[in-house]
Image (cartoon, rainbow, N blue to C red):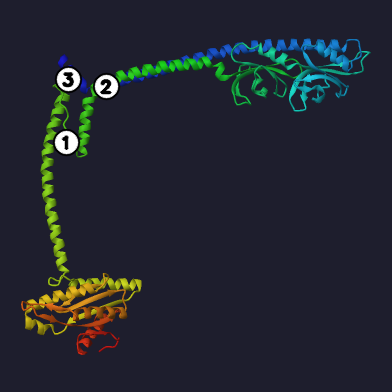
Amino acid sequence: MPHSHLRRQPIDSLATKIILFVFVSTFATALVVSWISIQSTHAYLSGMINQQFPVTLVRARNAVQSWVAGSAGELERIADSGGQLDQAALAKALARSARFEAFFLLTPEGAVRSAVGRVGATPATELRLDAGAKHLGLQRIFTSADTSTTGYATRLASRKQSHGVLLGAFRPQGIHTLLSNLRNGLGESVLLVDGTGHVVHGGGATAQKIPLSQLNAAGDPSIQDYINDAGVHVLGRAIPLGLADWFVVVESPFDVAFAPVVSVIKRIFVIDLCIILLFSFLAYKVTTAIVKPIETLSDGARRIAQGQFDLEIPEPTTHDEIGLLTRTFNDMMRKLRRNQMEIEAKNVELLDRNDQLRQANEVLEQLSITDGLTKLHNHRFFQDHLTREIKRVQRVNKPLSMIIADIDDFKALNDRLGHAAGDELLRRIARLMNDSIRDSDLLARYGGEEFVVLASDTDLGGAEQLAEKIRMAIAECSFILDESLRPTRTTVSMGVAQYDGNRKRFFAAADRSLYRAKAAGKNCVVVDDGEPG
């Protein structure tokens, strides 16, 4: 029974399915655990931030209110000092003050009557005041360069002072230090913001404007996340300062506040990756041991389908179904190779016979259009070529001329010297004429001792010159035709005509011109004059 189980196991697909199921389950479990861990860490940090930000906001509001109250008290003491406030008195008070960097005496309408001190690096006399600066309490003071600082205004109403307003500009560093000391370690910034959302003071703030409408959404006291005007993703919350319409805002960069979440994600990712790699390796090893023999057979079958028969699968030492299938597969491959070799041998033999047949057909085709004696094209080829040339000249509207040449007194020479000498003369004249024509012309043996030249793109004048060239070449040549070695001379008569649109008239004109050349004493060229003889 165990032996039977071992035989069935390699081809049992259930094993592979179980391995894949375990792998997928492990992978899914790792993802779920990771997600739960990340969500839990995120919720824990969110809870801490939601608890810590309100505490920081309340501390900051109390600290700022205390600072402003102390500054207001100092300003009230200066206003009620009992003496007349003038430039010198303001300068003396400024020298003793640790909270203010400039003082202004304003008229009841808010115009600057007197000023001492500097705001930042700008003299107080170069400042302009907010339109609302004549109102009492917390104020924003703007420089001529549109930068701002914070101050406090109190009314002058004693008997010794003329009616007006005393305005003091806070030292920014004091408020910045105060707000910076209120941070609790989450990378947050404590900001002092006016009613329009513009940042007035802030410990390390990068944004210049805060979305107060989002931070003060009705019924939503939780921390808000948003993109500030510096392009940074931040968390924030705001509460009213209780002075003027200003607010205290706590703001922290998102990636700093949730840095522990990022750290957890990284650790979980590394652990999950190690687990997945480990299980992948184990699944690969187990699956390979089970599936590899089947894949090898499948690959062999695919290669057979592609026509590859030169392979043999290594046979396993086992006697299970895979081993039996592998040995049967190799037997089949050997039979296929033998059959393929036999088919290839038959194909080579068939190709060889087809090549021989093709060569024989080419020889026959060439013989069918070639004159056996002169090796020139024969009458049949000339007629076919003439048909093609007539179609061409009709299409391109070019001239076409014909020259018919006949050897003079050939029959008498043939009777006197014999047929062998006559055949040799025909061959020699064929070579002379072939050497005299152009590559574009066609020379053919028309029959007996007659030859014909078809001159493409040639008018009567050009054809007459070509005919004279051929006639003179033959007339000036001496031929050795028999064993007597006596030179023999001969001449040809030639008729020339040009195609006029009618094939029959074309032939008749050339033939008529040849007849006239014979009648004129032979050894001459006669050009068709267009009149029937």
Q: Which mark is residue 287?
A: 2
Locate residue 467 relative to residue 117 in the image: left or right: left
Secondary structure beneath dot 1 equals: loop
Q: Nearer the viewer, residue 427 or 509?
A: 427
Q: Secondary structure at mark 3?
A: helix
* Circle 2 SS class: helix
Q: Residue at x 89, y 15 (%)?
A: 85
Residue 241 vertical placement versus 509 (above, below): above
Which residue position is annotated with label 3? 7
Q: Three-letter amino acid code at disc 2?
A: Thr
Q: CA distance from mark 2 to mark 1?
A: 28 Å
Which amino acid type is marked by label 1? Asp
Label 2 vs 1, first from the N-terminus: 2
In the image, residue 521 sits, relative to residue 471, either above or below, namely below
Q: Position of residue 486 (x, y in %)?
A: 9, 80
Q: CA distance from mark 1 to mark 3?
A: 29 Å
Near-viewer residue (133 or 40): 133
Q: Depth-wise, is mark 2 or mark 1 nearer the camera?
A: 1
The mark found on residue 310 in the picture is: 1
Residue 236 bears which disc, if any? none
